[in-house]
Image (tube, grey):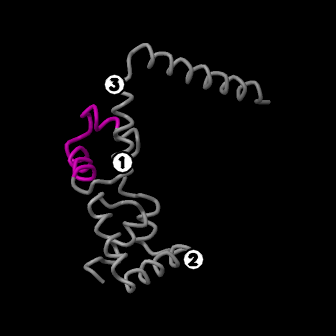
Amino acid sequence: MADVTREQLHAYLDDALSDSETARVEQALRDSEALRRSLRQAMQERDRGDHSLGAVWRRERLTCATREQLGSYLLRVLDEAEQDYLDFHLHTVGCPYCLANLADLQTLQKEPAPKAKERRRRFFRSSAGYLQVARDAKP
């Protein structure tokens, strides 16, 4: 099956492969009917709710960082072990979800001060209004 493993097929379905790996898997899928059958089988397993440890791990992204952790990573304030893990997760594994979150946080970091101040003011106003409504609703 053109050197594509079951794990790679699942990673392909999760959009968790690098661009070059995705292209390689897609070419292999075009060339191999057996691999296409394996992909359909993997999709059917997901549709009926695969509850294996690996499936739950991938689905819930248990190895991914929270946005708060990624923000701390950007500021380099994590302890050394956590900083090293996120370096590995981002730059060796190349997790597309964490890389997208990191890119978004980096964009926010570069936001001009007046724009950031206005965004924070809007968040505060909406949150303060919500909290006021919740406080008024208490018996």
Q: Tell me: residue 49, above or below residue 109.
A: below
Badge 3: residue crowd in 10 Å (few <14, some 14–19, many ≥20): few
Quick one: label 2 or label 3, which is nearer the N terminus? 2
Residue type, mark 1 in image? Cys
Image point 37% across, 81% down: which residue?
Answer: 35
**Number of the front mark, 2 or 3:** 3
Provide residue 76's location: percent of width, then percent of height.
24, 34
- Write down the quadrant of residue 70 in the picture: top left
**Magenta residue span:** 71-91
Q: Nearer the viewer, residue 13 or 70?
A: 13
Residue labelled with disc 2? 48
Residue labelled with disc 1? 98
Cβ atoms under marks 2 and 1 closer than 8 Å: no
Provide residue 38's location: percent of width, then percent of height.
41, 82
Badge 1: residue crowd in 10 Å (few <14, some 14–19, many ≥20): many
Mark 2 to mark 3 CA distance (whole Å): 44 Å
The label number, if any, that marks residue 110 in the structure image: 3
Name the element at disc 3: loop
Residue 11 magenta:
no
Provide residue 16's location: percent of width, then percent of height.
36, 60
**Number of the front mark, 1 or 3:** 3
Residue type, mark 2 in image? Arg
Q: How many marks?
A: 3
Residue 76 magenta:
yes
Mark 2 to mark 1 CA distance (whole Å): 27 Å
Q: Nearer the viewer, residue 132 or 91?
A: 91
Quick one: label 2 or label 1, which is nearer the N terminus? 2
